[in-house]
Image (cartoon, helix red, strand yellow):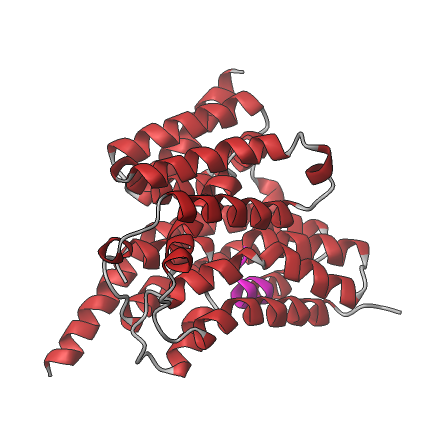
Amino acid sequence: MEHNKYVYILIAFSVICLIRVLPLTLIRRPIRSRFLRSFLYYVPYVTLAVMTFPAIVRATNTPLAGAAALIAGILAALWKGNLMLVATICCTVVLVLESFL
Amino acid sequence: MQETGSRMRSFAQGVRDGIPIALGYFAVAFSLGIAARNAGLRPMEGFLASFLCSASAGEHALFTLIAVGAGYLETALVSLVTNARYFLMSCALSQKFSPETSLLHRVLIGTKVTDELFGLNIARPGRVEPAYSYGAMVLPVPAWAAGTALGIRMGLLLSPRIVSALSVALYGMFLAVIIPPARKNAPVAVCVAAGFLLSLASQAVPLLVGLSEGTRTILLTVGIASAAALLFPVREAEDGA
């Protein structure tokens, strides 16, 4: 059977929507439980940290450039938290290092 | 109308904060477009997929599934796993909105809970006004879709060196979201460090290696955030809700 690309896209979209919309629409009140509040407070930081490392080292052509981008990114974020600036510094480090390696 | 004025201000602030994300998205979506091209997608199809889904890892998985002609049920299951982290983010975000926020606002904002837009909403002090969320998504969402379409059309024109450099842009943005709060708040710093270390370690643990990237992210998030919640319970005022 020939699969239709639009059906694939629609399936993915429907699943993603349910995942994203259900909690936001069903949890309407402030959560009272101190544990759950604390858990949800830490979730974003943990998730983003887990997704960043070691993935950033694998994303580049040479792992060394990815590792350098990670360190440069952390230093830049400590110095100034600006999203665009940190992203640009990471990209530049990779571009420069891979031009020489 | 003072209320309209404050809504306009929130919207404008959202738009401004969304600019760097839109630029980063455009660059990263370009490399996603290359994956879509390899899966045989046309620019219009890539545009639609990105405009609707707005998910990096989830779409990457989707394009891989299309490329191998996977079954529809498998597509639904893989989408569930690769995007499940948004469930946690949406739970966390539910606490940032006023209980009076309407269902329509919640649905519309909910469909675009991406990693970075989530980061912006979370970084906003106190409650988030829906106008801010809309402002934040107004540039990044089309930029993501346009970047994908353009990547499909001309991805091969970019040298591998440029693609490699662009591939770290999103991670740079993640760092910009998590590092500054970690500097001010020791438990958050512990969470970030534990996230880095255990994420690395999990790739060497035999039981976890077989799991998909998305599943590992969920397991580690639930484990580390639970431990942090037990060890360092947050005081009322601290979580900004």
The chief SS type of the magenta part is helix
Q: Please tell me whether residue B52 belongs to the stretch shown in magenta.
A: yes
- The image shows residue B146, relative to residue B23, as above or below, that is below
Residue B164 position, x and y percent, is 54, 33
Residue B113 visible somewhere in the drawing: no
Please give the name of the residue rendered at 39% of the width and 39% of the height, measured from the top-left corner.
B175
Give B121 or B165, whichever is nearer the viewer. Answer: B121
Residue B70 position, x and y percent, is 80, 59
Give B240 or B36, whichever is nearer the viewer. Answer: B240
**Apparent side of residue B3 relative to residue B193 in the rendered image (left or right):** left
Residue closest to the far right: A1
Residue A3 position, x and y percent, is 81, 68
Give A85 or A38, whichever is nearer the viewer. Answer: A38
Please give the name of the residue rendered at 62% of the width and 45% of the height, measured from the top-left corner.
B216
Dividing the picture into quadrants, the one containing residue B135 is bottom left
Please give the name of the residue rendered at 20% of the width and 74% of the height, measured from the top-left corner.
B7
Tell me how many marks there are. Answer: 0
Residue A48 position, x and y percent, is 46, 45
Quarter placement of the N terminus of chain A: bottom right
Residue closest to the far left: B2
Please give the name of the residue rendered at 62% of the width and 69% of the height, measured from the top-left corner.
A15
Quarter placement of the C terminus of chain A: top right
**Apparent side of residue B136 relative to residue A95 in the rendered image (left or right):** left
Dividing the picture into quadrants, the one containing residue B189 is top left
- The image shows residue B160, relative to residue B233, as above or below, that is above
Specify the segment rendered in magenta. B48-55
Residue B173 visible somewhere in the drawing: yes
**Apparent side of residue B119 relative to residue A67 in the rendered image (left or right):** left
Q: Please tell me whether residue B146 belongs to the stretch shown in magenta.
A: no
- The image shows residue B126, relative to residue B225, as above or below, that is below
